[in-house]
Structure formats: structure tokens, C-alpha cells
Amino acid sequence: MASNLLPECLEKIFTDLLNPIKPIFSNSVETCEIKDLYSCTLVSRYWCQISTPILYSSPFHHFRHLKGGKKPQMGKDFQDYYKLIRTLLTCIPCSEIEEIVKFVCEKGSTIELIGSTGSPTFNYVKFIRELHFDEKFFLNHV
């Protein structure tokens, strides 16, 4: 039944998952975790094609709004952050990656490249509409 919904309807539903909901009779604001939208990508290919562009429209949003207002932790939060960056880097053409490496080397720094395991399912970079990231992730770890 859900696959019979128009893509525009599903897109609206998925977009609303990311927006905070303020109940009428309450002062609290409930936020959806990114995993709720991620779960939508696993329902079917149809849902995946519609929800993935929304999921990657603001890829670092989740890290700025961790559940319960907690601060990023060194362990899992950083691993997830770097996995996301690695996924986005797989969408960049090799020639541009080589230019970045060349630029970094000219500045006297080194960069470790991770070999790609294949082409990504989507061109995730194409979906990005906002690029907000927390500088705290980079201050001590670059």
C-alpha cells in the first residue's frame, strides 16, 4: 500500500521527519533522530530513492543535534562522522582527489587516502543542500 503513494507524498512525510515537532499543549520539542529517516531507506528501493536525497540534504545535521543535547563523544560519534566523510569522498572524481592531495602536500602536510571499495549507490554529494559541521570534530583530530 505504501508503495502506491505518490513520490511527492512520501517526500513530504520524509521531510517532516527531520523537522522538529512542537506539540500544541507542551513546551517541549521532540526531534526525530536521523535513524528514523535512515530506516525509511531500508523499506524498499522505491522508498530508498525518495528518502536518500532528503537524508543527505544536510548530512552533518545529526552531529549538530545529538539526542538529548549531548556533546559529541570521541568514540562512536567520531567514527560515524568519518564514515560519512568517507562516503561523501567516494563521490568525488579521482582527478579532484589527486588535486586535493597535491595541494595538501604542497602545504607541507600529509593525507592518508582510503582505497575505494567501489562506486557508491548514489552520488550523495549531489543531494547536499546545507553543509554545517561542528568544528570541534576537527580541532584536535586533523
Image (tube, rainbow, N blue to C red):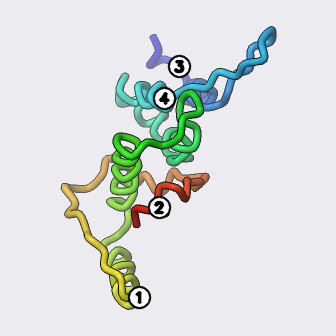
Q: Quadrant of residue 30?
A: top right
Q: Quadrant of residue 110?
A: bottom left
**Mark 2 nearby-residue class (10 Å; few <14, some 14–19, many ≥20):** few
Q: Amino acid at mark 1?
A: Lys
Quadrant where the C terminus lies? bottom left
Which residue is drawn at the image coordinates 54% and 53% (left, top)? 128
Q: Amino acid at mark 3?
A: Leu
Q: Are marks 3 and 2 in contact (CB under 8 Å)?
A: no
Which residue is drawn at the image coordinates 35% and 40% (left, top)? 76
Say which residue label 3 marks: 5
Q: CA distance from mark 1 to mark 3?
A: 52 Å
Is residue 27 found left or right of 112 in the rendered image? right
Classify mark 1: helix, strand or loop: loop
Q: CA distance from mark 1 to mark 2?
A: 18 Å
Labels 1, 4: front one: 1
Say which residue label 1 marks: 107
Labels 4, 3: front one: 4
Residue 27 vertical placement versus 66 (above, below): above
